[in-house]
Amino acid sequence: ILQADGATFAYRDESTGKTVYENGVGTLAEYNHLLLPPGDGVVDEVLSSGLVHLNQEIASDKYLISPGMTLPPNHEMAFMPLNTRNRVIGAILISSQSKISSAQTNLLQSIADIAANAFQRATLHEDTVRYASELEQRVEERTAELRRANQELARAARLKDEFMATMSHELST
């Protein structure tokens, strides 16, 4: 449908700030595991701005001039941000030897929206699972504390009963 010659996914590694390229296919397969420093490459610009970047002649794109990147000649590229409610979480890139039409751009935007939604839902699910695990751990810790407190109370009640029995016996004799 997109008639793309290559595609890849890119995101910013939050711990290093580097742009990471993953799952490249076709003409963009060599981008797999490519790491670019902060501020390098068009994807960094897309991730920072949240705006679509289309280029009809990628070899002349000032943002694409970066070490480690070779560009397919005479290709157009579309860089579509994956926008969630409050931030850009990545970008989908496609390259094509033919002109990327507005219909293809619209389709790519729809795919990016669906992917961003899926990533957000997966992240929320992971957060929920982690939070549930933390709550379960806290409940176990609190239950153990309550069990110890109950044992101490039972011991104190037993000592009180023994003391009262001893006192009662002493007072009656």
Image (cartoon, rainbow, N blue to C red):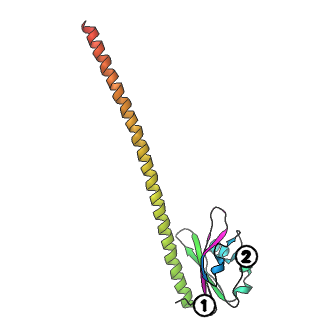
Residue 14 position, x and y percent, is 62, 63
The residue at the point 58 percent across, 88 percent down is 4
Q: Find the magenta span and give its range.
A: 1-22
Q: Which residue is at 53% across, 86% downward?
A: 106
Mark 1 residue element: loop
Whether the residues at callouts 2 and 1 have beta carbons within 8 Å, the answer is no
Residue 64 horizontal side relative to residue 85, left or right: right
- Gap between marks 2 and 1 measured at Cα: 25 Å
As drawn, the label of residue 100 is 1
Which residue is under mark 2? 68
Query: Residue 81 or 156: which is nearer the viewer?
Result: 156
Query: Within 10 Å of the Cα at label 1, are there few (<14), some (14-19), or many (20+) other Cα atoms?
Result: many
**Toward which corner of the image does residue 173 lie, by quadrant?**
top left
- Callout 2: helix, strand or loop? loop
Q: Image check: 101 left or right of 129? A: right
Residue located 56% across and 90% down the image: 3
Residue 102 seen by the camera: yes
Q: Residue 146: x, y in percent?
A: 39, 38
Task: Say if 3 sits above or below 120 in the image.
Answer: below
51, above or below 2, in the image: above
Q: Is residue 93 visible?
A: no
Quarter assignment of residue 46? bottom right
What residue type is disc 1 on? Ile
Amino acid found under the numbered disc labelled 2: Gly
Residue at x 42% of width, y 42% of height: 142
The verdict on residue 3 being magenta is yes
Q: Which of disc 1 and disc 2 is earlier in sequence?
A: 2
